[in-house]
Amino acid sequence: AETQAEAKRQRDRVEAGLMKTEEMRRELESALQAALAEREAAVDRAEDSELEASEAKEALAHAEAERDEARLRAQCAELNEQNAAATAAKAVEERDAAASARDAALEKSKHKDLKKQLVSVTEERDS
């Protein structure tokens, strides 16, 4: 009877150990599932971060391209303004040159008229 009681105690200890082992296995499996879920969530967050970083990089490149385009437009406008100023200055020079030529022609014409009048007065006096 003592041997049977000893065998029963050993069996009970073995069963308790098996139950404890099964409980630990379930806890480990649960912890493993939680760790896998956390890992998957971390991977998803990392992918989201990479996508956001890529989108931010794209937005930055687009903004830089727009800035460069605006800079080129400003340079073009400045060149157009300088061209317009040069054209205006040239027009003023041409106008001034034309006015000088006109004044010179008028002066020459007046000089000829005065010469004719002098010749005419001189001829009348001499006759």
Image: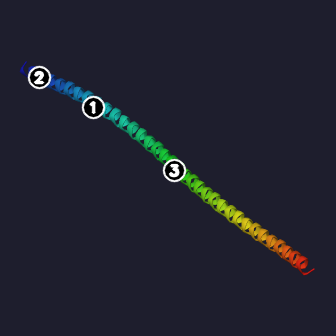
106 is higher (above) or lower (below) than 49 = below
Sequence-wise, which precedes: disc 2 or disc 1? 2
Residue type at mark 3 is Arg
The CA distance from mark 2 to mark 3 is 85 Å
Residue under pointer 2 = 9
Query: Picture coordinates of residue 85 (x, y %)?
Result: 62, 59
Residue type at mark 1 is Ala
84 is higher (above) or lower (below) than 45 = below
Q: Is residue 91 left or right of 46 when viewed as pictured?
A: right
Secondary structure of residue under mark 1: helix
Secondary structure of residue under mark 2: helix
- Looking at the rendering, which quadrant does residue 13 occupy? top left
Residue type at mark 2 is Arg
The CA distance from mark 3 to mark 1 is 53 Å
Q: Circle 3: is it few (<14), some (14-19), or many (20+) Cα within 10 Å?
A: few
Sequence-wise, which precedes: disc 3 or disc 1? 1
Residue under pointer 3 = 67
Which one is closest to the eye, mark 3 or mark 1? 3
Q: Which mark is residue 31?
A: 1
Sequence-wise, which precedes: disc 2 or disc 3? 2
Seen at 37% across and 34% down, the residue is 41
Secondary structure of residue under mark 3: helix
Query: Picture coordinates of residue 103 (x, y %)?
Result: 74, 68
Which one is closest to the eye, mark 2 or mark 1? 1
Q: Is residue 106 left or right of 51 when viewed as pictured?
A: right
Single out the residue that lies furthest toward the left. 2
55 is higher (above) or lower (below) than 101 = above
